[in-house]
Structure formats: structure tokens, C-alpha cells
Amino acid sequence: MLTVIHVPEELAAAQEKFNGEAGRAFVSGLPGLAAGFLDRWDLRVTGAPMHGVSALVLPVDRADGTPAVLKLQILDEESEGEPVALRIWNGDGAVRLLDHDTATGTMLLERLDPSRMLSRLPDAQEAVLVIARLLAHLTSTPAPPGMRRLGDLARAMLERTPGALARVPDPAARRILADCAAALREVVDEPGDRLLHWDLHEENVLASDRADWLAIDPKPLAGDPGFELWPALANRFDADDVRRRFDAMTDVLGLDRERARAWTYGRLLQNCLWDIEDGRPLEDRQLEIARRLSGRTP
């Protein structure tokens, strides 16, 4: 029986917004791409499609009845490293990769429980510690050769900063971003070599029967674990809790605080550069995290 795959409108709109013509081509080809892999890997769709900004995820069963998910995503410099990292972690702290197609970036993954997401854990402080423990485990592994490198990204950010600052009208915001760039310059020549997840926020941590919490959806880099801390500072944002969260995470990961603070400023700079270059206003939350980490509170 032919399975008809419907692409969610929200996914189509996100691909249009962020990837333009390439996104439209990806979306138009998704039904055929999905059908091909359902047949190739002998899969049966067992639930409604799920999606994020860049991927369509189909709950499926394998021929032997094993539950899994089929993840179809546009292949780019972020997604191409995902199966590499998942193979290295091999299910230890992260979702297990069951199969992968190099040409398209399509992956077959173990099925976790989307109803048991870390964002639904009532205790925000415990959620921060869950992320810290996962990061401590995942970043203990050296990155493989060929992985995108944090040092390259950081140097590119510093090159873009002067032009971006000229487009920020608020002098206080300009000063914060200039300070972030200055801190990043202090560490850019020692970018680290650990395998980073890069995007470990609360909605990228799910529970399963085999583990309390597992990471999904990495956008891996080779670099310093200090670059990983920002999402947990921004989740369920609480300005008064920024310093406590930062201290707790650096304790769990065993990081030098000054170095971790510099890389966190680098992550804030990266986010703000994207906003400036896309013509979006800077988020108060971003700037407040920088103020709180520097001790400059109103």
C-alpha cells in the first residue's frame, strides 16, 4: 500500500524563509524521498509526522517491529556532521543511529519518547544539571578529523563584527558586543578539540526506556566545551539565575570559568551577528545574559 507523505506547512515555510530556492526544492522532493527510504529500509509509518525548522521526522517500525524514526533533512554544513557525531557517541548519552544515507543526509534513528522532553521537567535547576551532565559526557570525546572547527567560526565572527557594530544604534548594546568580541579574541587561538553538540537546549533532550535522558539533533563542532553553555542559560530565561546556572555547569564540566565565560560571550556574539545581519532587533535576553555574566546588573 502506497504511503502518502504530507509535508507540514510550518516546515515548508521555514525552508522557504531560511533556504530559499534550495528549501523549496527540498520540500517538493520530500514525499518522494520519504517513499524511497521507506521502501529501501523496509519501514512502515506508524504515526503522524513531526518536524523542526529543518527536518521531517516520521515515526516508523522496522521489518522486525523495532520502533524507529526516519529523519529527512536538507544536507548542509551543519547536518552533514550529525551522523558522524552520533556514530562516535554510539548511543552513549545520545540517540542511537541505526542507518544513514550519505548522499542525502537521511537517517534512521532509534525512537525516543517525544512526550518526555526535558523542557517539561518542572524543576528548571535540575534541567540545567541534566544538560551539564550530558555535555560533560559528550564533550569528553575528541572530535574526528574533518569536523567543522570552532576556531574557524570564531575568526569569521571577529572579521564580521566591525561591520555589524556599525549597524547597532544603541551605544550600550554596541559596548556589550564589543566586549564580547574582545573576550573572544583572547581565546580564539586556543579553540579546543572536543566533539561539541552545539545545540543542546531543553527540547533537544528526550527520555527513553534505556536512559533517563538522551541528546538529539547535534550540529557538531570541534572545539571548547565552554561554547556549549548558552542554551541552558537561555532556556526558561531567568536573569537572576544566570550566574548560578553558569557556575553550576562549569563545575559539572570541570571548566575554567574565565575561559568558559569568554566562549559563552563568543556564542552570544554569534547569535547577535545573525540577528544584525538578518535585520532583526537584538534580543534583550541575549544582552542581559552578557550583563549578568560580567556582573553589570542594572
Image (spheres, grey):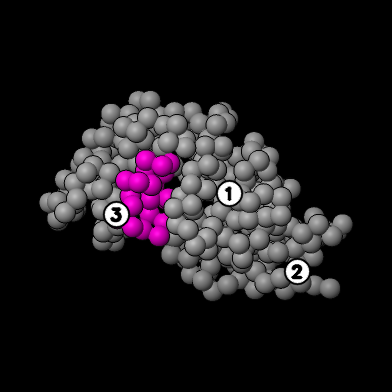
Instruction: Report if residue 199 is visible in the image.
Output: no
Q: Does residue 60 appear to the left or right of 251 in the view shown?
A: right
Q: Position of residue 182 (x, y in %)?
A: 23, 35
Dot 3 crowding, Cα within 10 Å, few <14, some 14–19, many 20+: few
Tell me the residue that label 3 is attached to: 240
Q: Earlier in the sequence, mark 2 or mark 1?
A: 2
Look at the image and tell me whether residue 259 can be seen.
yes
* Residue ID at (79%, 61%): 61
In this view, 224 is above or below 103? above
Magenta span: helix, strand or loop, mainly? Answer: helix
Closer to us: 117 or 181: 117
Between discs 1 and 3, the one toward the N terminus: 1
* Quadrant of the snapshot with the C terminus: bottom left
Measure how far apart labels 2 and 1 are at the Cα level: 23 Å
Q: Which residues are magenta?
A: 229-249
Residue 130: x and y, percent? Answer: 52, 48
Q: Residue at x 52, y 63 (%)?
A: 120
* Tag 1 residue: 215
Query: Around disc 2, counting alpha carbons within 10 Å, would you say few (fewer than 14), some (14 to 19), or many (20 or more)?
Result: few
Q: Disc 2 designates what residue?
A: 46
Between circles 2 and 1, the one closer to the viewer is 1
Query: Label 1 amino acid?
Result: Ala
276 horizontally vs 17: left or right: left
